[in-house]
Image (cartoon, helix red, strand yellow):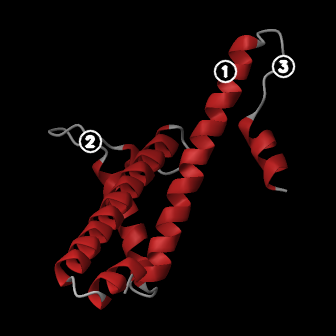
Amino acid sequence: DAPLSLAFEAVGWPWASSLVSLGAFAALTSSMLVTLMTAARIIFSMARDGLLPEWAACVHPKTHTQFFATISAGILAAIPTLFVDITSIADLTSMGNLMGFTGVCFCLMILRLQEELDEAPKLRFGVVFTSMMT
């Protein structure tokens, strides 16, 4: 029941309403897939660094992908969807993607600053990010 979809139905264009709904579904699906792939990569990296159990860093011998981390991320994402409505899931997915991209952009700014100021002390992401969030 998106406003644009309802507007098209109100003016008598049901085909446009269906097209908008299909586009929204495709956008939400691709956004969730990107989030799941990112989560799997984070789980894999954390396991490789010793922050999670070793089994999460296993790589499939045939496909050379982090299959345990991908399965774990899928299960962790699927469980809340059993109890939460789709609107909240869409909002959380959008916010998660926004925070991820913001973090990457912020880290790039820090890296560029560090390249320009070789003699400056190194900035730690956790300290800077925590100070920004408070």
Residue 16 higher or lower than 116, as above or below? below
Q: Which residue is mark 2?
A: 65
Residue 32 spot, x, y in % from top left: 37, 62
- Which residue is farthest top? 119
Question: Which badge, 3 or 1, comes first in the chain's sequence?
Answer: 1
Q: Which of labels 2 and 1 is toward the front? A: 1
Q: Is residue 51 something that shows in the picture?
A: no
Report the residue at 46% width, 50% height from top: 43
- Which residue is farthest front? 11
Q: Which mark is residue 41?
A: none
User: Quarter of the image holding residue 1?
Assistant: bottom left
Q: Which residue is mark 1?
A: 112
Q: Could you give the CA–CA distance between mark 3 and mark 2, rounded to whole angstroms?
A: 37 Å
Q: Residues within 10 Å of mark 3 (few under 14, many from 20)?
A: few
Q: Is residue 64 left or right of residue 69?
A: left
User: Quarter of the image holding residue 123?
Assistant: top right
Q: Which of labels 3 and 1 is toward the front? A: 1
Q: Which residue is mark 3?
A: 121
Q: Could you give the CA–CA distance between mark 3 and mark 1, rounded to whole angstroms?
A: 14 Å
Report the residue at 27% width, 87% height from top: 9
Q: Secondary structure at mark 1?
A: helix
Residue 50 spot, x, y in % from top left: 54, 42
Q: Secondary structure at mark 3?
A: loop
Q: Secondary structure at mark 2?
A: loop
Residue 71 spot, x, y in % from top left: 31, 60
Q: Residues within 10 Å of mark 1 (few under 14, many from 20)?
A: few
Question: Which badge, 3 or 2, comes first in the chain's sequence?
Answer: 2
Residue 128 spot, x, y in % from top left: 79, 40
